[in-house]
Amino acid sequence: MHKKILPVSLLAIAIIAAVIAGCTTTPASPSSDTQNVTGNANGIESGKTIAVGIEVKYPPYSYIDKDGKPQGFDIESAKWIAEDQGLNIEFRTVEWDGIIPALLAKKIDMVYSGMTITPERAEKVAFSDIYWVTDQGIAVKKNSPLTLDDVMSGKAKIGTQRGSTAEGWIRENLIGKGILDSGKLVLYDNFPFAITDLESGRIDAAMYDTPFVKKNLKGRDLEFLGIVENTEENYAVAVRNEDIELLDMLNTGLKNLKASPKWAELVKKYELE
Ligand code: GLN
């Protein structure tokens, strides 16, 4: 298991920082005194750049495009909120499995990447208000004889991403209840690897948050089998427990974003409804 932080393209960061900071021409470069300024009206150290941790392959919420730029529903939301709240932000990609440790180790300052609130995570970090709700979904090969009931009754070898709520759900509800043999759960560093194995027949089903599963099916010999009812993935932004002001600003920014026309525009653009 690797826990590496991969800075996204410096240019992309510079451009984003410049946009967020409201600079029109030159990319923001920290001036020598930015670290010493004591604080703005919001209590966040003036000039501080907030590092937003994202998963590199989680469309439509967060991903890096072919030019190395962060894109997605969560990326655009974070940029809008940062502008609304006067925050400087930059994006950093982190492997999902190590994203909470990276937050606690201050390698990043928040996680904005379709993170579901779970009791275990809430013991370690603070969550913003919920901004999106979805359910787990299952994909299989086109014309697979498997039904959703078959998958739910342990008849399929299931693949998913390590450290995800899908893994947690399978462990708790299938393996933990003796429905699925633990050898029939296959974990991957990234969900797209599960999709590759599903296509080649090494696993029978792949499970993840529904919008992401659907994004991965396009142009492949795979189909969406169905939603796992009542999995209820409540997405929120995570920050360190002590960063109360930042959390407050995020919640205000989220509220403002949801009340603005930008919200509907983003929902439509990323085909979330
Ligand atoms: N919602 C899922 C989770 O919280 C997946 C999020 C992700 O892969 N970025 O684990």
Image (cartoon, rainbow, N blue to C red):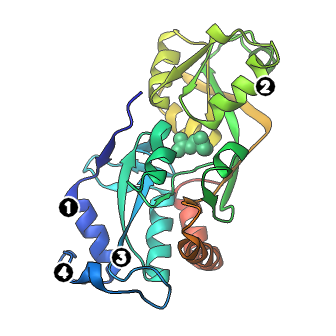
Label 3 sits on residue: 20
Q: Residue furthest bottom?
A: 41
Question: Quarter of the picture for ligand 1?
Answer: top right
Instruction: Locate residue 49: give its quadrant.
Output: bottom left
Say which element carries label 2. helix
Instruction: Locate residue 273: give its quadrant.
Output: bottom right
Q: Is residue 61 above or below residue 257?
A: above
- How much space separates mark 2 and mark 1, taking CA atoms? 44 Å
Residue type (three-letter) at the residue carrying disc 4: Ser
- How much space separates mark 3 and mark 1, taking CA atoms? 14 Å
Whether residues under marks 3 and 1 lie with C-beta atoms below 8 angstroms apart, the answer is: no
**Classed neighbour count for the residue bearing mark 3: other residues with Cα under 10 Å, few (<14), some (14–19), many (≥20):** many
- How much space separates mark 4 and mark 3, taking CA atoms? 16 Å
Q: Is residue 197 above or below residue 246?
A: above
- How much space separates mark 2 and mark 4, taking CA atoms? 53 Å
Label 4 sits on residue: 31
Q: Earlier in the sequence, mark 2 or mark 1?
A: 1
Please state which of residues 61 and 175 is positioned toward the viewer in this rendering. 175
Relative image position of residue 82 (x, y in whole percent)? 45, 75
Residue type (three-letter) at the residue carrying disc 1: Leu
Mark whose residue sits in front, 4 or 3: 4
Label 1 sits on residue: 11
Whether residues under marks 2 and 4 lie with C-beta atoms below 8 angstroms apart, the answer is: no
Q: Earlier in the sequence, mark 2 or mark 4?
A: 4
Say which element carries label 1. helix
Residue type (three-letter) at the residue carrying disc 2: Asn
